[in-house]
Image (cartoon, helix red, strand yellow):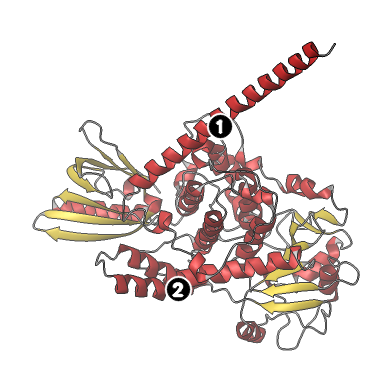
Amino acid sequence: MEFAELIKTPRVDNVVLHRPFYPAVEGTLCLTGHHLILSSRQDNTEELWHLHSNIDAIDKRFVGSLGTIIIKCKDFRIIQLDIPGMEECLNIASSIEALSTLDSITLMYPFFYRPMFEVIEDGWHSFLPEQEFELYSSATSEWRLSYVNKEFAVCPSYPPIVTVPKSIDDEALRKVATFRHGGRFPVLSYYHKKNGMVIMRSGQPLTGTNGRRCKEDEKLINATLRAGKRGYIIDTRSLNVAQQARAKGGGFEQEAHYPQWRRIHKSIERYHILQESLIKLVEACNDQTHNMDRWLSKLEASNWLTHIKEILTAACLAAQCIDREGASVLIHGTEGTDSTLQVTSLAQIILEPRSRTIRGFEALIEREWLQAGHPFQQRCAQSAYCNTKQKWEAPVFLLFLDCVWQILRQFPCSFEFNENFLIMLFEHAYASQFGTFLGNNESERCKLKLQQKTMSLWSWVNQPGELSKFTNPLFEANNLVIWPSVAPQSLPLWEGIFLRWNRSSKYLDEAYEEMVNIIEYNKELQAKVNILRRQLAELETENGMQESP
């Protein structure tokens, strides 16, 4: 298919652009296969380059021969184009609709993008499983890398290489895979060096109504326990939902078959409930009535902050089991690709200082989201404005980033990255020139040959010039476990995401710059103090030598 077939009118003059925090601009609108571009001959005017894949929905209005297109974006921005001529307006609108909903992944911009920067690091090879395994293999010999899934035959949503107990062979893993939803047998998510406890994750067991069991599954899970120790299974469904799953062939671990494990249900919502929550929240944030009661009731009705609280509570529970109870944990819901990953990754941010660094957090996203099979292509296909709702969309990753921001806000000196880093990840998960978030799992990414045909997001982010934008000036390495508060009063709305297009951040940006300047000045003064102290110590030494006979 040629993009030209979808572009009915490639160029229109005298188009007026309205967007948040910029004056209206008149210029020429051009449509390409992947971008909507508006350029103006006015001096000091920034061009608009907008990816079609970032467009969530468009509305059309007409007053006489003047047409208006309102573009609602996946990053919650709303921009308006005033286009002279009804035919041109209709043609532009239908072209944008077609170009923003391409069926084929290989027609998307990452396959056409060529970087304008020098690639110093190939991000596709920055966080390989073998490298991650080496980080804790020196502390324990109880785990091994398994290549049982190298052809994606055992579990289509797992990566080719997984970490499993050394005492369990690949044949046993194949049997366990037939007993777990989607073939997602229990694998290592995190090893706590302080006490050797682990977090594992999986899909639900397929016990069904007959109470089916699998001896290999029981052996695998028990292999993670120390002698005389108990473990915890955190099920991210309510007991009622887990029991209903048995009728469909799913279920949960029977206590009779897993006597050393205690099961805890921590209900976290999924799918359309989360999507509806996001839609209601963004609608509330865009409400311009300025009525306090209306705002507060809409915010509460969205339930967004309730979902944040539920996820953080489950993550804190998992971290407590590991660090305070000295017990290993298995986490799963139904598939093990959504709420499970939210909990495992947030527990690591609480427990593991490395996860709070920039590269450590990138490794966490690779390991616990991309390689672990979170279906980004399905979940992030649409955002808060799209009218055609399919059942797979859900802001699971955005909720995770919001939870990270909540912890960052409570521990502002313990994270190497800043809020802009989290916002950037949200934007690229929904629309990007990079191939990192394309596809639903590693199997799909291999078939698409993303490593050969697209650029990794990490290749761009990890350039020194870009990293400086995402570095937290307050960061001081903190090797302790951090325990966030989950009290409702401690969990505010993330304004940096949800209100950034509704009100200017000019004064906040100025305050941030001033803070950076103060910190830099403080470092300079500290360096001068250190020099003076050294000079004073040298003078005292010299005086002491002169005074001694």
Task: Residue at 22% x, 36% y: name it.
Answer: 40
Question: Horizontal placement of 455 versus 156: left or right?
Answer: left
| Vertical comparison of 111 with 73: above or below | above
Query: In the rendered view, would you say 104 is above or below 127?
Result: below
Position in image of residue 229 (x %, y %): 86, 71
Residue at left 83%, top 65%?
224
Compare marks 1 and 2 and give the one earlier in the sequence.
2
From the image, tell me which residue sits under label 2. 303
Label 1: which residue? 523
What residue is at 69 percent from the left and 64 percent from the top?
319
Amino acid tagged 2: Asn
Task: Characterize the local packing of mark 1: few (<14), some (14-19) or many (20 or more) Cα atoms within 10 angstroms.
Answer: few
Q: Secondary structure at mark 2?
A: loop
Check whether the beta carbons of the residues at disc 1 and disc 2 lie within 8 A of each other. no
Q: Is residue 3 visible?
A: no
Residue 455 percent coordinates (x, y) = 54, 40
Against 68, residue 243 (above or below) is below
Query: What is the x, y in percent for residue 438?
Result: 53, 52
